[in-house]
C-alpha cells in the first residue's frame, strides 16, 4: 500500500479505495447514490477531499449495523457539504436509529429461534412451515415475501387467521392476526 501523506488535501479514487478499504466500484456507487462527492480535474479524474475518508467509514459502519443506504444518504444530507460527521452528529443519528435497530434485533432473535428445525425453504418441515404458500395463494397480494415481514408485526392486510403471539396489543390493532401455516 502506498502511504498517502497526512496533509494531502485531495485523494484520487484509487487512493481513497486503498486507504478506506472500499472497492473503487463501491466508491463510484456511493457517489452515484449521493453519499459522497468528488470534483473533476481538467483530465476528468475524480478527486475527493480528505474528509471523504471519514464519510466512507461512517457509511460502512452504518451499513454494517443494517442501516439502509437511503437512510444513510438522508442522514448525511443533513450535514453541511464537505463536513465530516462528528460526535454530536453520530449521537443524534444513532439515537434516531436506535428504535429501528432494537426492532431489527428482536426480529432477528425471533427468526433465529424459529429456525430451530427449519432451514426456511419448507422441504424439511412443510407440514408446519410458517412460510409455506401452496398454489401461490399469497401471490395475489403482490410481490415479495408475505409471511416473513421485516417489521415486528405484519401489516393488517397480510394478517388473517391465527393471532401472532409476538404481536402484542400495543404493537398491532386488536383484529390483526397472522396467516395460518399451510
Image: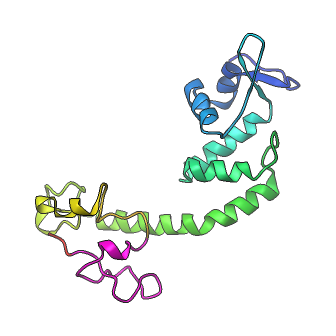
Residue that lies at the very extreme toward the right in this rendered image: 7
Q: Residue at x 46, y 81 (%)?
A: 171
Q: Residue at x 42, y 85 (%)?
A: 168
User: Residue 164: where, in percent of width, then height?
Assistant: 31, 80
Is the residue 128 above or below the residue 65 in the image? below
Quadrant of the image containing the N terminus: top right
User: Residue 31: where, in percent of width, then height?
Assistant: 64, 33
Residue interval drawn in magenta: 152-179
**Left or right: residue 8 compared with residue 2:** right
Residue 50, by quadrant, is: top right
In terms of depth relative to the viewer, which is nearer, 80 or 21? Answer: 80
**Does 102 lie within the magenta span?**
no
User: Residue 175: where, in percent of width, then height?
Assistant: 33, 87
Applied colour scheme: rainbow
Q: Residue at x 22, y 62 (%)?
A: 140
**Does 156 lie within the magenta span?**
yes
Is the residue 2 above or below the residue 91 in the image? above
Amino acid at each position: 500500500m502506498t502511504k498517502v501523506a497526512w496533509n494531502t488535501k485531495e485523494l484520487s479514487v484509487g487512493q481513497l479505495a486503498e486507504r478506506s478499504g472500499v472497492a473503487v466500484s463501491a466508491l463510484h456507487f456511493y457517489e452515484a447514490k449521493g453519499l459522497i462527492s468528488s470534483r473533476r480535474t481538467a483530465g476528468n479524474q475524480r478527486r475527493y477531499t480528505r474528509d471523504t475518508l471519514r464519510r466512507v467509514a461512517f457509511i460502512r459502519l452504518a451499513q454494517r449495523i443494517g442501516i439502509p443506504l437511503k437512510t444513510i444518504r438522508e442522514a448525511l444530507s443533513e450535514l453541511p457539504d464537505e463536513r465530516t460527521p462528528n460526535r454530536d452528529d453520530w449521537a443524534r443519528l444513532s439515537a434516531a436509529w436506535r428504535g429501528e435497530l432494537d426492532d431489527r434485533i428482536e426480529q432477528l432473535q425471533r427468526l433465529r429461534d424459529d429456525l430451530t428445525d427449519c432451514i426456511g425453504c419448507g422441504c424439511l418441515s412443510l407440514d408446519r412451515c410458517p412460510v409455506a404458500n401452496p398454489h401461490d395463494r399469497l401471490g395475489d397480494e403482490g410481490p415479495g415475501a408475505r409471511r416473513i415481514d421485516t417489521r415486528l408485526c405484519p401489516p393488517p392486510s397480510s394478517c388473517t387467521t391465527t393471532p401472532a403471539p409476538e404481536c402484542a396489543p400495543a404493537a398491532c390493532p386488536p383484529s390483526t392476526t397472522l396467516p395460518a401455516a399451510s
